[in-house]
Image: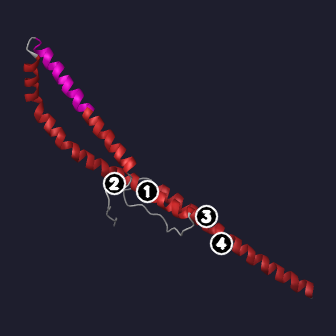
Amino acid sequence: MSIARQRKFVDFAVQGGIVARLVAYWFATVGISLSLAMVIGWFSNPLAPLAQQWARQMQLIWPLLLATFMVLPIAVLGLVRFTHRFAGPVLRLRRCLNDLADGRAVAPLKFRKGDFWPELADAFNRVVAMKESLQTRPRSLRAELADSEARDEEVVGV
C-alpha cells in the first residue's frame, strides 16, 4: 500500500516551471486558434466589415473558449500529480544525500509505487551500504592488527 502524498507541490521550481510552460502553450494555442478562425472567417466573407466578422466568429468560438478554460485547471492538476512522480523521488533523494553528507544515519531509501526512477533508490542504497562497510572496515583492521601484535608478543616472549 502506498502512502498518500501530503503536498501537491514538492519542488516548486520544477513543477511550477512545467505548469507555467503548459499554461503558456495553452494561451499560445488559443491565440493561434482564434487568429486562424478570424482569417478563415475573413476569407469566407472578405467584404463584410471587420467588426461584423469578429462578432460572428465570437458567436461560433465562445463555447470552445469556455470549454478550454474549463479544461485548463484539470490539465494543470493532472500535470502536477504527474510531475509529483519524479519531483517527489528527487526531493527525497536530495534530503537523504544531505543527511548522508552531514554524517546523519540514513534509512534505506524507498520510493512510492508508481514513482519514476526506482533505480535511483537502489543505487543510493548501494552507496550507503558501501559507505557503512568502509566505515566498519578500519575497526576490523585495527582489531586484526591488535590480535597480530598480541601474537607477535607471545612469540617473542616465549
Q: Counting other residues with Cα less than 10 Å from the Cα at mark 4, is it few (<14), some (14-19), or many (20 or more)?
A: few
Q: Label 3: state its secondary structure.
A: helix
Residue linked to disc 1 = 91
Name the residue nearer the viewer: 99 or 75: 99
Q: Which of marks 1 and 4 is nearer the N terminus?
A: 1
Residue 36 vs 15, above or below: the answer is above
Q: Does the magenta stretch include residue 32?
A: yes
Residue 115's label in the rendered image is none
Q: Is 103 left, or right, of 138 in this rendering?
A: left
How far is the residue under mark 3 from the one under mark 2? 33 Å
* Quarter of the rendering occupied by the C terminus: bottom right
Are the two marked residues, 2 and 1, in contact with CB atoms closer than 8 angstroms?
Answer: no
User: Do residues under tags 1 and 4 come within 8 Å of each other at their CB atoms?
Assistant: no
Element marked by disc 2: loop
Colouring style:
secondary structure
Q: Earlier in the sequence, mark 3 or mark 2?
A: 2
Q: Where is residue 75 in the image (x, y as percent from the top left)?
A: 25, 45
Gap between marks 3 and 4 measured at Cα: 10 Å
Question: 10 Å neighbourhood of mark 3: few (<14), some, or many (≥20)?
Answer: few
Q: Percent x, y for residue 116?
A: 41, 53
Upstream in the sequence, badge 1 or badge 3? Answer: 1
Q: How far apart are marks 2 and 1 (CA)?
A: 11 Å
Instruction: Determine which residue is flagged by label 2.
Output: 9
Please tell me which residue lies in front, 141 or 57.
57
C-alpha span from label 1 to label 4: 29 Å
Q: Can you identify the residue that label 4 sits on?
A: 136
Residue position for label 3: 130
Residue range corresponding to the magenta coloring: 28-46
